[in-house]
C-alpha cells in the first residue's frame, strides 16, 4: 500500500470511529447496529497467552474456576493476556491501573454499550449500564433522584415489615438451602418495592418472568425460534413484565406511592418532562435485575462468612441489638459500622461481578502492549481484590481491613471495585447496602447462623454472577 492509500485508510478509520462515538452519544440504534454488523473482529494474536483448546478456547477453565484461571494467566503473562471462547474473544487487563483506564475512560476510547449489548439485547434494552457518553450522563442524572434519601426512606418503609415477616417463616433448627430462601425474599421485595406488586398470584407471575429474563442472558444460542430455549423464554418474560408496566403507568402517574414504579412515573428531568413509558419500562426491568441478583449474591457470601466466623456474627448481633430498635430507620444505617466492614469484606472476597467488560473504540497502549480497536476488554474485580500488594493475607476473611485504623481498601482508589467505578459506578450502591443491612438486622437479632463443620470452603461459581453451587446449606437457630 502506498503512502496516499495508507493516509486514506487512516482518515476513513478516524471518520468511522467518530461516527460510532456520535451514534453512542445519541443512542442511535440503527447506526450502532450497522457498525456492529460491518466491523470485523480484531487480530489479538500478538497479545500474550495461549489460545486454549481448539474452538472451545478457554471456555471451560473460565467458567469452572475463573479466579484460578485468571491468576494462572497473570502469573505466566503479566497484567495483559488474551481470552478466547466460542462466544467471544477478549483482552484481559489486570490491576488498579487497568481499572482506572476502564472507569475513567479518558478520550472516550471505551464503550459500555458495545460490551454489554451481546448479553442484554432484547432482554434488558436501554439499561443505564449499556449507555455511553452524553446519552448515559443525561439518563443517569435523571435516575439519581430515585436513589436519594427521600426515595430510599420510602423503600425502607416498604421493606421493613416484608423482610422481617419473611425471615420469621424460614425453617429453624435444620439445614436448608439458604440461597433459595434469599432469592425468594428478594424477588418478593423487588416486586413490592420496585413494581408495587403485592405478594400473590400476580407477583408469582412477575417473579417467574424475571427469572426467565435473567436466565436468557446466559444462553449462547440466543434464538427466539427455539421456543423452549432460555433466551426465547427470557424474551417472553420481558413481554410479560412490560405488559404489566405499560398497563399500570396511567394509574401510577395519577397516584403517589413509595414504590420505584410510582416514583419513576412522576419523576421529571431538568426540562420538567416526565419520563416516557418506554423509559420507565426499560429502567424498571433493569433496576429489578440489578437490585435482586447482585444482592442475592452478596448476601449469600455474607451468610457463609458469618457461619464460618461466629465471633464476627456475635459482633454484628451486639451492634444491632445496641440500636434498640424494632424497625430500622435511615439514620440507623450509618451506625452499623461493623456490619459495613463485614459486607465490604464479603464483597471483596466474592464480588457479585467477577469483572467488567468494555469495548475498545480506538487502539490504545497499556503496559507496553498495543490493544487493537474493536477489541473486547475485561478488567477483573476478583483479581484486584486478592492482589497481595494491596491486601494483607487476601485469602483470609478479615473485616477489620476496612476499619479506619487499617483502611486497606484506600491504598489505591481503583483496587476495590465491587460496584465498578467512574461514570458507570453502580447507581444503586447505597440502596443495595441498605437492603443488605436490613436483612442482616432482622436475621441476626433473632437467629444464629451455623454450617456443617465439614463445609470448609465457599463453593462458588463466579460466572455470570457469583452464586454458591451447593445452594448454601446453612442452619438457622432461633435465639
Image (tube, rainbow, N blue to C red):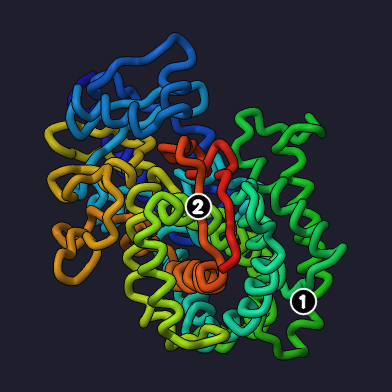
Q: At 52% from the left edge and 73% from the top edge, which residue is drawn? A: 445
Residue at far right of view:
201
Q: Does residue 417 lie above or below 10 as drawn?
A: below
Q: Does residue 87 lie above or below 108 as drawn?
A: above
Front of the two marks 1 and 2: 2
Does residue 223 appear to the left or right of 151 in the view shown? Answer: right
Q: How many other residues sit within 10 Å of disc 2, few (<14), some (14-19) or many (≥20)?
A: many
Quick one: quadrant of the C terminus? bottom right
Q: Does residue 46 lie above or below 37 as drawn?
A: above
Return the mark for residue 450.
Answer: 2
Q: Dot 2: what SS?
A: strand
- Residue 205 falls in image quadrant: bottom right
Does residue 397 appear to the left or right of 467 in the view shown? Answer: left
Does residue 322 appear to the left or right of 34 in the view shown? Answer: left
Q: At 31% from the left edge and 31% from the top edge, which residue is drawn? A: 70
Q: At 55% from the left edge and 55% from the top edge, which residue is drawn? A: 296
Q: Nearer the viewer, residue 317 or 70?
A: 317
Q: Dot 1: what SS?
A: helix
Amino acid at each position: 500500500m502506498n503512502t496516499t492509500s495508507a493516509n486514506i485508510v487512516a482518515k476513513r478509520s478516524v471518520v468511522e470511529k467518530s461516527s460510532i462515538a456520535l451514534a453512542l452519544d445519541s443512542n442511535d440504534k440503527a447506526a450502532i447496529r450497522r457498525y456492529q454488523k460491518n466491523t470485523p473482529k480484531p487480530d489479538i494474536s500478538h497479545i500474550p497467552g495461549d489460545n486454549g483448546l481448539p474452538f472451545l478456547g478457554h471456555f471451560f477453565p473460565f467458567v469452572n474456576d475463573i479466579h484460578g484461571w485468571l491468576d494462572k494467566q497473570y502469573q505466566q503473562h503479566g497484567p495483559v493476556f488474551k481470552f478466547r471462547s466460542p462466544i467471544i474473544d477478549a483482552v484481559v487487563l489486570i490491576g488498579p491501573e487497568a481499572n482506572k483506564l476502564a472507569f475513567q475512560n479518558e478520550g472516550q476510547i471505551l464503550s459500555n454499550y458495545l460490551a454489554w449489548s451481546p448479553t442484554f439485547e432484547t432482554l434488558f434494552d436501554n439499561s443505564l449500564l449499556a449507555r455511553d457518553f452524553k446519552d448515559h450522563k443525561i439518563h443517569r442524572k435523571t435516575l439519581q433522584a430515585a436513589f436519594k434519601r427521600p426515595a430510599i426512606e420510602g423503600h425502607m418503609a416498604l421493606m421493613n415489615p416484608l423482610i422481617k415477616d419473611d425471615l420469621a417463616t424460614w425453617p429453624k433448627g435444620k439445614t436448608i438451602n439458604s440461597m433459595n430462601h434469599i432469592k425468594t425474599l428478594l424477588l418478593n421485595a423487588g416486586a413490592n418495592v420496585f413494581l408495587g406488586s403485592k405478594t400473590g398470584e400476580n407477583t408469582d407471575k412477575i417473579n417467574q418472568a424475571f427469572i426467565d429474563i435473567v436466565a436468557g442472558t446466559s444462553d449462547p444460542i440466543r434464538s427466539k425460534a427455539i421456543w423452549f430455549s432460555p433466551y426465547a423464554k427470557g424474551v417472553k418474560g420481558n413481554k410479560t413484565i412490560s405488559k404489566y408496566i405499560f398497563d399500570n403507568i396511567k394509574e401510577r402517574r395519577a397516584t403517589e406511592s413509595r414504590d420505584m414504579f410510582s416514583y419513576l412515573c412522576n419523576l421529571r428531568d431538568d426540562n420538567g418532562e416526565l419520563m416516557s413509558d418506554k423509559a420507565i419500562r426499560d429502567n424498571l426491568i433493569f433496576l429489578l435485575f440489578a437490585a435482586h441478583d447482585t444482592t442475592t449474591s452478596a448476601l449469600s457470601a455474607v451468610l457463609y462468612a458469618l457461619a464460618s466466623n461466629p465471633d464476627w456474627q456475635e459482633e454484628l448481633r451486639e451492634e444491632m441489638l445496641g440500636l434498640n430498635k424494632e424497625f430500622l430507620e435511615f439514620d440507623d444505617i450509618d451506625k452499623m459500622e461493623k456490619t459495613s466492614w463485614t459486607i465490604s469484606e464479603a464483597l471483596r472476597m466474592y464480588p457479585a461481578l467477577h469483572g467488567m467488560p468494555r469495548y475498545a473504540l480506538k487502539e490504545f497502549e497499556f503496559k507496553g502492549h498495543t490493544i487493537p480497536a474493536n477489541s473486547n476488554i475485561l478488567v477483573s474485580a476478583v483479581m484486584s481484590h486478592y492482589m497481595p500488594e494491596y491486601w494483607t493475607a487476601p485469602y483470609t476473611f478479615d473485616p477489620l481491613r476496612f476499619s479506619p485504623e487499617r483502611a486497606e481498601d484506600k491504598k489505591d482508589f481503583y483496587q476495590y471495585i465491587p460496584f465498578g467505578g467512574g461514570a458507570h459506578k453502580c447507581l444503586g450502591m447505597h440502596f443495595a447496602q441498605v437492603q443488605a443491612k436490613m436483612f442482616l438486622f432482622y436475621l441476626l437479632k433473632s437467629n444464629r447462623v451455623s454450617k456443617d463443620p465439614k463445609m470448609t470452603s465457599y463453593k462458588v461459581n463466579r460466572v455470570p454472577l457469583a452464586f454458591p453451587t451447593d445452594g448454601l446449606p446453612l442452619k438457622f437457630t432461633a435465639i
